Amino acid sequence: MSAFREEDPRINSIRTKIRLVPNFPKQGIDFLDITTLLLDPKAFKNTIDMFVERYKNKNISVVAGIEARGFIFGPPIALAIGAKFVPLRKPRKLPGEVISEEYTLEYGSDCLEMHLGAVQRGECALVVDDLVATGGTLCAAMNLLERAGAEVVECACVIELPALKDR
Amino acid sequence: MTSRNVEDRIQKISSVIRVIPDFPKPGIMFQDITTLLLDTKAFKDCIDLFVERYKDKNISVVAGVEARGFIFGPPIALAIGAKFVPLRKPGKLPGEVIREEYSLEYGEDIMEMHVGAVNAGERAIIVDDLIATGGTLRAALNLLEHVGVEVVECTCLIELPELKGRDRLGDKPLFVLVSAS
């Protein structure tokens, strides 16, 4: 369910800035490209503001962002609400000791990692990515945080592809 | 804001960066900024220091190098009213791209930017977490200059001065918060 009623005028300014690129990364996939949103400072700011308004008084102390496009939206939200930012990364990128969560892709599997000690038991967390499709990546992210004892308050994405029945 | 205040903030930032020995391979002391991101005040101070430096310089483009440049670039861009342009590994950007090849210690890599992301004559800064040999930043610089952008400065949290990355940038200014030797 969208967090905001369609009447919020900022939604349209954001939606129109997202570019659809057909047949990427392969034939038949319509890729939703947020880089064009980032080229419009006002629309990018509106995007962040809408998330901040929703999360600022919810006692959230952790914003976890999924590599790599979650790194673009997560930190500005974290800074604005006074939370720490925790990057969730592909294997072997994080230099310290990590916990890993494997998840399935359409073909094969992948793995998401988080630094040990990044979150404390009982913290309230938000997971951020640019887009939710099947939800596999977000589930892996939630599992990582919950294994570390955090409570995932919500997952926040700029775009949802509801046809893929992610929730 | 006094210079003592700047020094204090830099000192704090430096103290929360974690050094991990032998990563990604033996002999390398890896400068880990993820611990900085866990310190809300230090992370904010870090962004503020960059914003204070660039906010009245008519900069319309903040280009960030994948992936850690994506963490620091967007908050700076938002605060100074500039657009954010991600510079990515090959095959990640979905639209038409221009690419720049650059050498690594062993082998080569490619950096890509979307066609049309920037316009000739725009003023830009390039952001990454760290400059080592300068190869990555040099590639980013080339990408932007090839399309007529004026790169005002390259900006990083950390410099490894022994690797002389600064020289690789030629006459392009480099600004860093912390020098790690």
Image (cartoon, coloured by chain):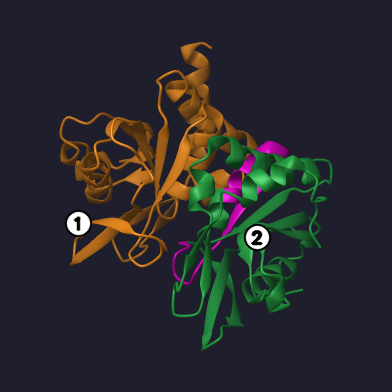
Chain colours: A green, B orange
Name the residue located 51 percent from the left edge and 11 percent from the top edge: B2
**Front-lying residue, B88 or B171:** B88
Q: Of tags 1 and 2, which is closer to the observer?
A: 2
* SS label for mark 1: strand
- A93 left or right, relative to A144: left
Based on the picture, tell me whether residue A122 belongs to the magenta stretch: no
Q: Quadrant of residue A153?
A: bottom right
Q: Position of residue A7 (x, y in %)?
A: 80, 46
- Could you tell me the amino acid type at mark 2? Ile
How many labels, in total? 2
Name the residue located 72 percent from the left edge and 71 percent from the top edge: A162
Name the residue located 32 percent from the left edge and 57 percent from the top edge: B97
Tell me if mark 2 has few (under 14), some (14-19) or many (20+) residues whose alpha carbon lies within 10 angstroms of its own. some
Q: Quadrant of residue B147?
A: top left
Screen quadrant of the C terminus of chain A: bottom right
Q: CA distance from mark 1 to mark 2?
A: 34 Å
Residue at the far top in the pictured view:
B2
Circle 2 is placed at which residue position?
A159
**Front-lying residue, B152 or A140:** B152
Answer whether residue A30 is visible to the viewer in this image: yes
**Front-lying residue, B26 or A40:** A40
Circle 1 is placed at which residue position?
B102
The residue stretch that appears in magenta: A73-95
* SS label for mark 2: strand
Q: Chain of mark 1?
A: B
- Vertical comparison of B59 with A96: above or below: above
- B144 left or right, relative to A111: left
Tell me if mark 1 has few (under 14), some (14-19) or many (20+) residues whose alpha carbon lies within 10 angstroms of its own. some
- Could you tell me the amino acid type at mark 1? Tyr
